[in-house]
Image: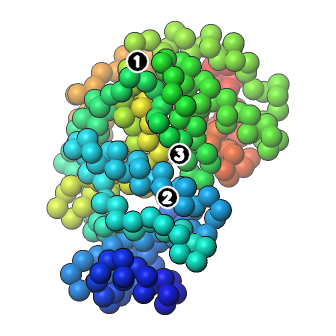
Amino acid sequence: MNHDLRSYVSTLLKESIIKVFSVQGGDISKAYRIDTPKNSYFLKLNGAINAKKMFQSEAHGLQLIRKTSTIKTPKVLAYDTFEDTAFLLMEFIENKSPSSEDSKNLGLQLAALHKCTSEDFGLGQDNFIGSLAQSNTQHKTWLDFYIYERLLPQLELAQQKRLLSKNECPSIQKIEDVLESLFVDIKPALLHGDLWSGNYLISKDGTPYLIDPASYYGHYEVDIAMSKLFGGFDTSFYEAYFSNLKSDKNTSARIEIYQFYYLLVHLNLFGHSYYGSVFSILKKYF
């Protein structure tokens, strides 16, 4: 982090900066902890062309979740561009490894978030999943939203990148036929949208925080599907969550269908190593 940016951030904060050091901040951006005499802050930097748009979307998602008063997110202080580099400035959350009780609280608070609803599926603005664009065009039915705004864009991108052939990709009619019986009586729920273990924190006092959202209104099982994709969370998380929101005989099938979206995203971001996982779901359901 150069001297000019450090001075600019100090002016924004109206505080003198005493220490800056690099911290883990995900795959996409550089991240720093900034200490002032009284506070600590978290700064993400990214020089990509669409980085400011990505940070605006992230800030919007954090604020959307925060406004529900169901689960905490770090307070967003600013997002802007400085000398061709976009930045996002937030409060810094000192975190710890989650206990079973912390995981239970995360499950309870996520369930409360998922009870926040809307007229439509989607969101008033598009955002990103990783560095890929994610369309949130609103639909009245979950079936239409999930097919047209989630599966089809990723299947088309995979074909463009020659990661899937046209013959391997199911037709719209085939997808509809498979999903119609699984997507029954689903109401919009506010989602985190990318809920893996790296996208929540437990603060030193045990408070759960969500970070790095890709939020929209969708089926609540989407967040559960993503949480289970790479090993899953503590058992106490799922017990607490499902004590508040129901599962049914089709939940396990839907979870695989929702993981299919995230596996397509990983295929398009990271390449052929995800082909086997994608193909196994294509073969099983389509």
Q: Residues within 10 Å of mark 1 (few under 14, many from 20)?
A: some
Amino acid type at image mark 3: Asn
Circle 1 residue: 186
Name which quarter of the figure residue 165 lies in: top right
Q: Nearer the viewer, residue 88 or 278?
A: 88
Q: Which mark is residue 55?
A: 2
Instruction: Say which amino acid is labelled 1.
Output: Ile
Towards the viewer: 165 or 78:
78
- Residue 273 lies, with reference to residue 146, above or below; the image says below
- Inter-mark Cα distance, 1 to 2: 30 Å
Q: Nearer the viewer, residue 125 or 193?
A: 125
Q: Is residue 113 left or right of residue 122?
A: left
The residue sitting at 53% across, 35% down in the picture is 136
Nearer the N terminus, badge 3 or badge 1? 3
Distance Cα–Cα, label 3 vs label 2:
9 Å
Tag 2's secondary structure?
A: helix
Q: Determine the secondary structure under disc 1.
A: loop
Q: Which residue is mark 3?
A: 127
Residue 228 horizontal/vertical position (percent): 44, 39
Above or below 281: residue 1: below
- Element under disc 3: strand
Q: Is residue 97 visible?
A: no
At label 2, which amino acid type do we have? Phe
Residue for point 51% across, 27% down: 138
Q: Nearer the viewer, mark 1 or mark 2?
A: 2
Q: Are marks 3 and 1 in contact (CB under 8 Å)?
A: no
Label 3 and label 1: CA atoms lie apart by: 23 Å
